[in-house]
Image (cartoon, rainbow, N blue to C red):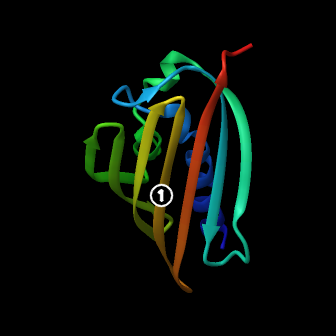
Amino acid sequence: MKTLISICAGLGLFFSTIPMLLASEFSMQSGKWEFSHTLKMSSLPQPVVEVSSECITPEEASQDPLADFVDGGNCTISKRKVDGDRISFELECREEGIISRGKGELRGQGNTVSGFVEMTMDNPGGPMKVSTRWQGKRLGSCQ
């Protein structure tokens, strides 16, 4: 269970930062943004919804959105495809003997961003589905 919580916490952290990490292929402006994140897990009775706001610098807006997965050393990205304002991908993560596989998509359109990741975790007690969706909108300049 500790491993499961660790993986979910890591995924939650990654998902909460994806909107600010959109690659230069996307049309995303720097400034103050509001993000909404919805996490669903087959083991949770209801989705977890969070809303946050943050200032996105031009440097953050130009970073590779999938770098956090690879930088942690536990995940690999495959079938990455850039199509206009979208990046779709598949990923596999391994941590403490648990393998998670899934797919996702990111989209940036100037003043709005959105995306999702859907994964299945192969737990000793049986597979568990995890999905997250997020969207963001630019509110204006940073103060």
Q: Which amino acid does label 1 sit on?
A: Val
Residue that appears at 72% across and 33% down: 53
Q: Where is residue 10 in the image (x, y as percent from the top left)?
A: 59, 52
Up/down of 51 relative to 48, above or below = above
What is the quadrant of the C terminus in the image?
top right
Residue denoted by label 1: 117
- Extreme residue toward the bottom, this view: 125
Left or right: 106, with 30 as reference point? left
**Camera-side residue of 124 and 109:** 109
Q: Residue sitting at 69 percent across and 67 percent down?
A: 47
* Towards the viewer: 92 or 131: 131
* For residue 136, side relative to residue 117 (left or right): right
Q: Give the image location of residue 106, x and y in percent.
A: 43, 45
- Residue at the (61%, 34%) spot, across then down: 137
Q: Where is residue 77 in the image (x, y as percent from the top left)?
A: 32, 51
* Element type where label 1 sits in the image: strand
x 55%, y 68%: residue: 130
Q: Please, is residue 77 above or below residue 82 in the view?
A: below
The residue closer to the viewer here, 88 or 77, is 88
Please provide percent x and percent y for residue 62: 43, 23
The front one of 98 and 31 is: 31
Is 97 situated left or right of 33 in this image? left
